Structures are given as structure tokens and as C-alpha cells.
Image (cartoon, rainbow, N blue to C red):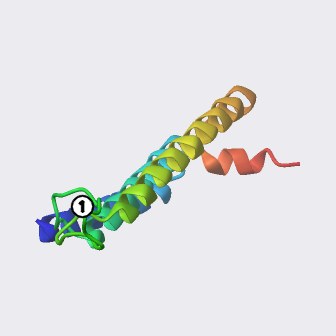
């Protein structure tokens, strides 16, 4: 399972970088979204898929029973998902405003309007 997810992460990174290298602002935002999802999936894959029990200490015991799910990667991914949605929403609002002012999504034409 980890091997398949490693290829999926690699594909997402490749597609995200390819889209970010295009001259369209929409493709830049889509590439940024793909990169954030690839990073989340990478963290999830590196954390491993072992342990289907929650990380709770049973009553009368002093340590966690093995194997247990690691809550740290899940907390990191949830935080990253919220931040990536906020960045994507800000990027879409910025794109909408720039498109209304300039009338194009080509980054080269936007650079030509700087004065």
C-alpha cells in the first residue's frame, strides 16, 4: 500500500509543479492545491498504516497498547488542510480581483501592467 501511495505522491508533485510552471494564474492555483494535497498524503504515508486502535491508555495500565494509531500526523494533516483551504481561498479572491482589473490570467501580461 505504501508503494502505491508513494507513486501517487510523486504523480501529484509532478502534476503540481508542471501546473505551477504554466503562465496561467488559474493553473498556478491548481498546482498549489495539488502540491498541498501531495504534502498531506506524504505525511500520512510516512506515518504508516499500522495500528487500528485509538491512542488511549486502558484503565489500570500505564502505557499504550501496541499497535495504536499515531495522532500526531493526523493533527498535522488536519491543520495543513485548513491552512491550504485558506491559502486557496485567498488566492482565488486575489485572482478574481486581478482578473477584473486587468482582464487576463496570463502572468506575462500581468507583469507588463506594473508601472
Q: Quadrant of residue 86?
A: top right
Q: Quadrant of residue 10?
A: bottom left
Q: Residue furthest front?
A: 60
Q: Residue furthest left?
A: 1
Image position, residue 33 (x, y; %)? 45, 49
Taking 61 as reference, is 95 left or right?
right
In the image, is 45 to the left or to the right of 19? left
Look at 25% across and 69% down and name the residue there: 61
Can residue 69 be seen here? The reply is yes
SS of the residue under disc 1:
loop
Depth check: give the residue in front, 40 or 64.
Answer: 64
Closer to us: 85 or 22? 85
| Residue drawn at point x = 57 percent, y = 37 percent | 89
Query: Relative to the observer, which residue lies in front, 28 or 91?
Result: 91
To which residue does mark 1 refer? 58
Residue 105 in view, yes or no: no
Amino acid at each position: 500500500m505504501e508503494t502505491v501511495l508513494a507513486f501517487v505522491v510523486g504523480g501529484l508533485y509532478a502534476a503540481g509543479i508542471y501546473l505551477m510552471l504554466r503562465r496561467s494564474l488559474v493553473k498556478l492555483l491548481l498546482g498549489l492545491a495539488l502540491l498541498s494535497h501531495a504534502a498531506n498524503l506524504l505525511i500520512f504515508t510516512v506515518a504508516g498504516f499500522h495500528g487500528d486502535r485509538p491512542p488511549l491508555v486502558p484503565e489500570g495500565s500505564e502505557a499504550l497498547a501496541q499497535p495504536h494509531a499515531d495522532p500526531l500526523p493526523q493533527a498535522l494533516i488536519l491543520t495543513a488542510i485548513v491552512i491550504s483551504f485558506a491559502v486557496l481561498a485567498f488566492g482565488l479572491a486575489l485572482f478574481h480581483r486581478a482578473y477584473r482589473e486587468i482582464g487576463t490570467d496570463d502572468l506575462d501580461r500581468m507583469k507588463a501592467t506594473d508601472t
